[in-house]
Amino acid sequence: MGPACLAATAVSNVADGAHDAGVARALGVDAQPWHSLDAAAAGVLAWVPVGTLTARAAMGGAVVLAAAGAVVFVLARALLGACAEAPRFGAMVAVIATWCALLGGAWQMEAGVGGAALPAALAVAPLAALAAGNPLRLTVFLLALAFSQDPLAGLCAYAACGAFVLVDPEMRAGMLEAWRRDWRALAALKLAGLAPLGLAMARTRAAGVPVMEALMAPYAGERGTSAVGAPGHFVQGEIGAVLLAAAVVGTGLALLVPRARGTAAALVVMTAAGLACGWLGAPLGPTRFGAPVLAAVACACALAGVAMQALVRAIAGARVPLARASAAMVLVLELAAPVDIADETYGRGSVRPHGAPPWLDSPAATWDDTAWGVLPPRAVVLVTDRTVWRRAAAAEASGSLRGDVAVVPTFAHGAAASRVLARDAALMPLWRDLELAGTPSEGALSSLAAARPVAMAFAPAWAHVLAKHLVPAGLFDRFEPEPRGTSDRRKGLEWFLPKRERLARAVARAHDKRFADPEIADATAVLLRQRLLDLAASGDRDLVGRAVDDIHAFAPDDPTAAEVVQKMVLGKSRP
């Protein structure tokens, strides 16, 4: 319950921008084949009449973290018990090892809406089942379930269990005998574990999304603005030199004990494979972390628990006065490690903009107010980017998006678009253009703007004649039935300036050049970049400088802004 309680303190009515895709998936707005159990986890506490749907789903994530704590504790306790009997303090060392993993920033941040905590727990669960001596049926089912939730985490779990069986001869003989005797039931359990993936694939196909494209897109988890590649920086920042050294020592000690050799080999393989998934696209932080990476952290901390227990046992068994009291003090010192980790994690989640009062809205809430709060009644918003589309889905879940506003994903087809476009007959001309040509025409948008307010972000692939109809209004541009002049666009930019400054203050981080919510800054830069291209396409050279200043507040080194400045200000041709 310790990690779950810490995660519950970070529950917010509005999720951070890094988990927009997770919110959309967990609440059933965005159909995806992987992470299909996120909706079930999000619905655990959906009946509680507290906060928004996003907050209730995040509380479900805290419950998932509690279950993950139980799984990691079982694994650590089995490993420590196999290494040496320590009835007085073995369980406490297992708790310390569990807390070192689950109180860290990686697990805590992914315990939110649609995070990687659930697939990471499912990846560790088969190892815990094998180490605790549970039957093969449970292990086979958990392996299939882990793969259906996250393919990389599932493959790491398969590799770790394979190492367990290969190293432990008794386990290998028992597995072969159980497979010969019970292969039909094991095959049925494997299919049952893969059932969530099959159902999610069917739902994805029904939504009009190509299944193969959906299977390949998020297979490594949502990255956001997090890094991928070599895991050295992640190991240094999230595990630390002390825990890493303890894990190395614990690995050596565990491999020397025949009873613990299989479990230790499995944990080493899971740790190495999970960290190596960074090269395959698993995010390594600082805002998102992949499920294999979380599983690697849990296994490394379990191995570190072996060294912790060995140190306490060595001191308790020493032939010196007050040996047991000294061992108890060492155990208390080891307990300080997860407490320090929890304090650092809590501090990371409490960062506020420079000089901001404690009641200031989060960057995501300020973004929602800037984007959706200024829209007129019954507005139709055309979204051309998936990042902004998922931000809209997260806003709908948190109640920041009004029910009269229709958000149309212009890049989607089939059920994903028809769910919105079929609501109003005035949207039929737009629907026809998107299905036949893939882009809206000037006539369709003009007729729609005469019936309902239209807000959009300009796409470079669209006809440049549309740029003359757009006037800045918040983060989006308002489409007018008739072309507008430079003075109208200038007034729109001047009206947006104080809102931009407020959003920039909310996204900024005190005494740091990085952003408090880089995904929100990225979503803002996407819309402002499209506005810059709109002004450049309409030939408003005098306003390009203001649009560039808007982008630089959220993307100081934006290459598109530099290219537009070079072509519009220093050159003669339009971009």
Image: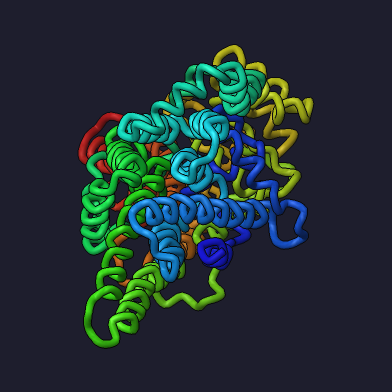
In-front residue for pair 138/574: 138
Residue at screen point 30% across, 34% down? 167
47 or 180: nearer the eye? Answer: 180
Residue lying at 48% horizontally and 22% vertically, measured from the top left: 177
Q: Residue at x 45, y 26 (%)?
A: 175
Q: Quadrant of the N terminus?
A: bottom right
Left or right position of 473 against 202: left
Question: Where 510 sits versus 453, above or below?
Answer: below
Locate residue 443, reporting x and y percent.
Answer: 63, 22
Toward the front, the furthest residue is 319
* Residue 410 point in image, percent of width and height: 57, 27
What is the quadrant of the C terminus in the image?
A: top left
Residue 282, by quadrant, is top left
Asked whether the viewer can see residue 496, the reply is yes
| Nearer to me, 184 or 301 | 184
Q: Would residue 444 be visible to someone looking at this image? A: no
Q: Picture coordinates of residue 568 (x, y %)? A: 28, 38
Find residue 114 and report its image quarter: top right
Q: Nearer the viewer, residue 572 or 222?
A: 222
Q: Is 78 left, or right, of 479 in this rendering? A: left
Q: How many marks?
A: 0
**Percent of width and height locating residue 28:** 66, 37
